[in-house]
Image (cartoon, grey):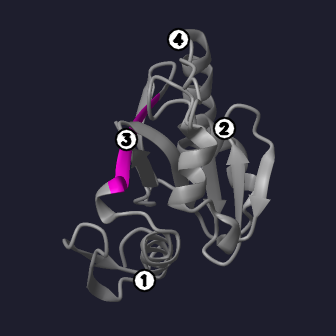
Amino acid sequence: MNGHHLVLGNLVDFITGETIQDNHDEQYRQKLARLLVNKKGYYKEEITPRSKLYVKAGDKKAVVKVDLVVTLGSKVCMIVRYGPGSIVTRQRPSLAASRLIEPYQVPFVVVTNGEDARTLEGASGKVFSEGLLSIPSKHDLTEITDGTSFDPVSSRQAKMESRILYTFEVEGTCPCDDATERL
């Protein structure tokens, strides 16, 4: 056992080709990566798995992972965050991540438990679509984000979003959970 995950051995990451630990959560992440490439038209090179995001709340620091980061052209246009259970409870911390992963507001945020999903508009937090199959395709995301201004996130807002993400993803977790790294 590692953290709270039953280790099932190793698997080859669909996006990078590297060997990583196999567990139930990772199997869902791999399913999502395959969906984006095989059904939604993204190239593997446009998807970055397990991106590290440094967060801070006062003197406390940690690293939180963003499961999948989708970059079109030179801009991150969508992030995907996976977590088991209720996707509603993952919306706010995922929006915070969309305001920290780049110095601008990422336009779309997908929260999913691997069986269901919600795609949120990054700026407003409003639900754009529901269901795994409703995640925007590369063609749709390209059209939707064409002309997007990619507004910068102020340092004040970034500080608040970092506190929110830290609280949701670090403070409430068991110290043996390996999904985050306390610094």
Please indicate whether residue 116 sits to the left or right of residue 177 in the image.
Answer: right
The residue singled out by tag 4 in the image is 155
Q: Amino acid at mark 4?
A: Ser
- Give, as a single range, the part of the protein colored magenta: 46-55
Q: CA distance from mark 1 to mark 2?
A: 33 Å
| Badge number at residue 6 | 1
Q: Position of residue 180 (x, y in %)?
A: 43, 50
Q: Residue at 63% across / 44% down in the picture?
A: 144
Q: Amino acid at mark 1?
A: Leu
Secondary structure under the numbered disc 4 in the rendered image: helix
In reply to whether residue 47 is colored magenta, the answer given is yes
Q: Quadrant of residue 103?
A: top left
* Residue where numbered disc 2 is placed: 122
Please tell me whether mark 3 sits on a helix, a strand or a loop: loop
Where is residue 179 drawn, in percent x and y? 44, 57
From the viewer's perspective, is the residue at label 1 or at label 3 nearer? 3
Label for residue 73? 3
Foreground mark, 1 or 4? 4
